Image (tube, helix red, strand yellow):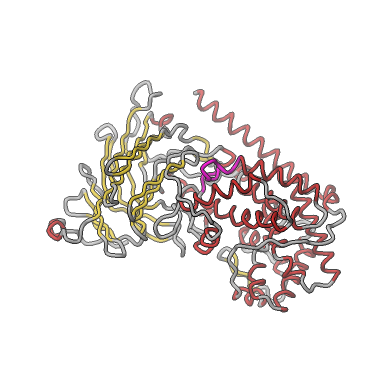
C-alpha cells in the first residue's frame, strides 16, 4: 500500500471520527433528559430588530393565509390543518417551513390579518415542534429561525397580547440556549458562521444577554478571521456563500450601531473585503461564475447587497488566497479557477473544476461551467462536481478530485473531497497587448502520472482569447504509465449561444443573441459539438452544447485553441467558412 493511500485513509478516518463525535455530541445535547437546560427564565423583551434584507413577496401572504405552502418545488395544501403536523413532501420543504423565512412575505403584506396569521403559525409550531423535532431542531435550522423571529419581531409582537409575548420569548430563549450549546458541533463553514450570527443577533436584540454577548462576539471574530480570506473570498471557495453571509452580516453591523456599540473590527473588515469580491465573480450580465457549488445568481439579493457597497472598489484581478483569476478587457471577462480544494471539512460543496474558466462578452456569457440548480440539487450534485461538468481538460475519463462515494459514510460526513490537486502554481503577466495567466495542477499525478498545464491569454482589445493546454509527466512519476492516455478538452456553451461546426472541422462559429459572431478554432485538432446541460439557469436545467477536443496524450500532448470576435465587415471570410446545418438538441 502506497504512502499516499495510507495518509489519505488516516485523514479520512480522523475526519469521520471527528464528525461522528460531533454528531453524538449534538444528539446528546438534544436528549430529553438534558433539555431542561434550555428552559430557564426567558428574556423579558426584545429591544431592537435588525432589517431583513432578503426579498419579500406580499402575494405569497395570501397563499399562506389560504393554507398553501410552496417550498423547494413542492406544494402542500393544509386544508385547515397545521403545516407542522403534516408529513412533509421532502426534507428541503420541511427545512424551509421550519426556518420561518417565509415570515417576510407576511410582513410585506402588513395587515392585521397577516400579523394574526404569523402569530397563529408560531403558536402552532410551538405546540407541535417547540420542544423537539428532528428537522426543526437541527442547529442550522434553529439558527435561521432565530434570525427570522428576531428580525420580524416588531411585526409579530406589535399588537400581541401579553401571554403570546411571554410564550414567544420563552421559546426563543430556549432556542438560543440550545444553539449556544450545539454551535460547536455544526458543520464547518457557512452553517457554523450563520449560527454564530444568529447568536450575535440574539445577544444584541434580546434584553439581559451580557454573557451571551461576550461569547457570541468572540466566536464571531474568530470565525470571520478564519473563514473570510484576505482577498475577501470564503474558505469554502463557493462564490454564492458571500451573498448569503452578507445578507446576515450587513444588518448585524447596523445592529451594533443601534445599540450604541462599536462593531468588532473583524466584522467591519470582513464586510469591506467581501464587497469587492462580489464584483470579482460577476460577468457582464451581472451573474456570478458557477464555481464550487454556485447555482443561479439571485439578482434581487445581489442588488440589495451591492447597494451597501459605498466604496464600490474595483475588484482584484488576482485573488490568490481564494484561488481565482480574473482577466478583463473592454466588454470581455474571463474567470478562471486556479485553486486547490478547500480542507476536507469544508469541501462538501467543492467541485473538481481546477483550471476551468468562464468567458463572457458584453452581457452575454459564452463559455460556462454546468453549475448547480436551485431545486433537485441532490440528484445533480455528483455529476455537477465532476471535472467533465467544467470547461477544462479531463484525462482518462477521470475527475481531478476524488469524492467520498460510500453511501454509509455519506450519511455521517457528507461527500468531502478525498484527493485533489495539492499544488497549483500560477503566474500572471501583463503583456503589451493583453494579459496572460499560466497555471498547472497535479490532480492526475498520483493516479496517472500526468500534470495538466493551461495558459490563457486575453488580448488588450478583448477581441481574442487564446489558450494552450499541455499534458506533461508529473515530476513524481519515475517512468511513463501505460494506462489510458485519452483526454477531452471541454468548453460548455451557454444555452443562448448558437453553435455550428465549420466545414474544415477544426472550427466552430458561435452566434450570440446580439448577433455578434465569435469563432472557436482548435488549429491542429478536429472539434465536435456534443450535448451538455446548463444546470444554473434561472428556470432550472437547460439543454445546451459543449465544444469538445478529443486526443491522446502520447500523440498530441499539446492543444492550442482560440476564440476570435469576427468583424462584421469580414464578409468574404464568412462566405469561405460555410457552416453546416445546426444539429437539433
Whether residue 117 is in magenta: the answer is: no
Whether residue 227 is in magenta: the answer is: yes
- Residue 104's spot in the image, x, y percent? 65, 68
Image-quadrant location for residue 152: bottom right
**Residue drawn at x 64%, y 63% as measured from the top left:** 52
* Residues rendered magenta in the picture: 226-238
- Residue 229's spot in the image, x, y percent? 55, 41
Total marks drawn?
Answer: 0
With respect to residue 373, does 1 lie above or below? above
Q: Is 395 placed left or right of 159 in the picture?
A: left
Query: In this orientation, does residue 531 appear?
Result: no
Q: State the residue in front, 543 or 302.
A: 302
Q: State the residue in front, 463 or 443.
A: 463
- Residue 198's spot in the image, x, y percent? 70, 53
Q: State the residue in front, 342 or 548.
A: 342
**Residue drawn at x 63%, y 58% as measured from the top left:** 91
Q: Is 445 placed left or right of 434 in the picture?
A: right
- Residue 207's spot in the image, x, y percent? 81, 57
Q: Is 461 placed left or right of 223 in the picture?
A: left
Image-quadrant location for residue 111: bottom right
In this view, the residue farthest toward the right is: 41
Image-quadrant location for residue 509: bottom left
Query: In this orientation, does residue 288 appear?
Result: yes
Quadrant of the image containing the C terminus: bottom left
**Residue drawn at x 75%, y 65% as measured from the top left:** 125
Q: Is 30 placed left or right of 409 in the picture?
A: right
Main SS of residues in magenta? loop
Amino acid at each position: 500500500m502506497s504512502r499516499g493511500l495510507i495518509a489519505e485513509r488516516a485523514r479520512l478516518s480522523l475526519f469521520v471520527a471527528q464528525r461522528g463525535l460531533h454528531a453524538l455530541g449534538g444528539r446528546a445535547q438534544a436528549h430529553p433528559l438534558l433539555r431542561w437546560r434550555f428552559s430557564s427564565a426567558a428574556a423579558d423583551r426584545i429591544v431592537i430588530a435588525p432589517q431583513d434584507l432578503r426579498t419579500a413577496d406580499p402575494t405569497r401572504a395570501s397563499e399562506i393565509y389560504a393554507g398553501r405552502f410552496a417550498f423547494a418545488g413542492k406544494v402542500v395544501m393544509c386544508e385547515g390543518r397545521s403545516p407542522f403536523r403534516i408529513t412533509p413532501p421532502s426534507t428541503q420543504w420541511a427545512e424551509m417551513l421550519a426556518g420561518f423565512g417565509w415570515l417576510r412575505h407576511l410582513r410585506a403584506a402588513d395587515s392585521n390579518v397577516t400579523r394574526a396569521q404569523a402569530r397563529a403559525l408560531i403558536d402552532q409550531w410551538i405546540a407541535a415542534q417547540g420542544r423537539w423535532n428532528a428537522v426543526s431542531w437541527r442547529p442550522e435550522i434553529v439558527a435561521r429561525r432565530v434570525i427570522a423571529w428576531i428580525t420580524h419581531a416588531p411585526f409579530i409582537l406589535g399588537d400581541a397580547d401579553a401571554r403570546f409575548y411571554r410564550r414567544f420569548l420563552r421559546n426563543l430563549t430556549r432556542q438560543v440556549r440550545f444553539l449556544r450549546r450545539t454551535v460547536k458541533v455544526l458543520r464547518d463553514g457557512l452553517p457554523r458562521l450563520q449560527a454564530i450570527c444568529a447568536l450575535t443577533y440574539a445577544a444584541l436584540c434580546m434584553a439581559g444577554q451580557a454573557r451571551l454577548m461576550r461569547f457570541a462576539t468572540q466566536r464571531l471574530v474568530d470565525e470571520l478571521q478564519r473563514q473570510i480570506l484576505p482577498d475577501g473570498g470564503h474558505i469554502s471557495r463557493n462564490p454564492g456563500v458571500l451573498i448569503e453571509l452578507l445578507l446576515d452580516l450587513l444588518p448585524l453591523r447596523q445592529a451594533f450601531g443601534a445599540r450604541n456599540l462599536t462593531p468588532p473590527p473583524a466584522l467591519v473588515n470582513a464586510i469591506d473585503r467581501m464587497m469587492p469580491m462580489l464584483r470579482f465573480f460577476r460577468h457582464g450580465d451581472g451573474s456570478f461564475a458557477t464555481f464550487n457549488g454556485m447555482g443561479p445568481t439571485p439578482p434581487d439579493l445581489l442588488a440589495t447587497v451591492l447597494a451597501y457597497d459605498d466604496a464600490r472598489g474595483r475588484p482584484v484581478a488576482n485573488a490568490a488566497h481564494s484561488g481565482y483569476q480574473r482577466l478583463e478587457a473592454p466588454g470581455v471577462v474571463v474567470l478562471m479557477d486556479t485553486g486547490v480544494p478547500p480542507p476536507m471539512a469544508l469541501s462538501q460543496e467543492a467541485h473538481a473544476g481546477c483550471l476551468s474558466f468562464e468567458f463572457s462578452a458584453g452581457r452575454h456569457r459564452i463559455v460556462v461551467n454546468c453549475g448547480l440548480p436551485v431545486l433537485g440539487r441532490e440528484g445533480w450534485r455528483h455529476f455537477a462536481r465532476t471535472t467533465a461538468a467544467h470547461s477544462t481538460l479531463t484525462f482518462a475519463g477521470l475527475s481531478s478530485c476524488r469524492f467520498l462515494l460510500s453511501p454509509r459514510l455519506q450519511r455521517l460526513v457528507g461527500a468531502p473531497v478525498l484527493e485533489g490537486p495539492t499544488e497549483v502554481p500560477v503566474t500572471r503577466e501583463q503583456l503589451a497587448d493583453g494579459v496572460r495567466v499560466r497555471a498547472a495542477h497535479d490532480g492526475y499525478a498520483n493516479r496517472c502520472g500526468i500534470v495538466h498545464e493551461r495558459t490563457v491569454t486575453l488580448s488588450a482589445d478583448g477581441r481574442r482569447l487564446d489558450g494552450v493546454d499541455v499534458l506533461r509527466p508529473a515530476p513524481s512519476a519515475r517512468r511513463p504509465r501505460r494506462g489510458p492516455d485519452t483526454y477531452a478538452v471541454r468548453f460548455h456553451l451557454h444555452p443562448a449561444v448558437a453553435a455550428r461546426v465549420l466545414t474544415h472541422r477544426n472550427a466552430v462559429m458561435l452566434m450570440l443573441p446580439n448577433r455578434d459572431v465569435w469563432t472557436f478554432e482548435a488549429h491542429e485538432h478536429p472539434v465536435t459539438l456534443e450535448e451538455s446541460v446548463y444546470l444554473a439557469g434561472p428556470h432550472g436545467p437547460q439543454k445546451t452544447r459543449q465544444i469538445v477536443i478529443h486526443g491522446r496524450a502520447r500523440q498530441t500532448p499539446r492543444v492550442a485553441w482560440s476564440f476570435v470576435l469576427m468583424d462584421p465587415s469580414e464578409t468574404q471570410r464568412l462566405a469561405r467558412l460555410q457552416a453546416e446545418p445546426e444539429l437539433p438538441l
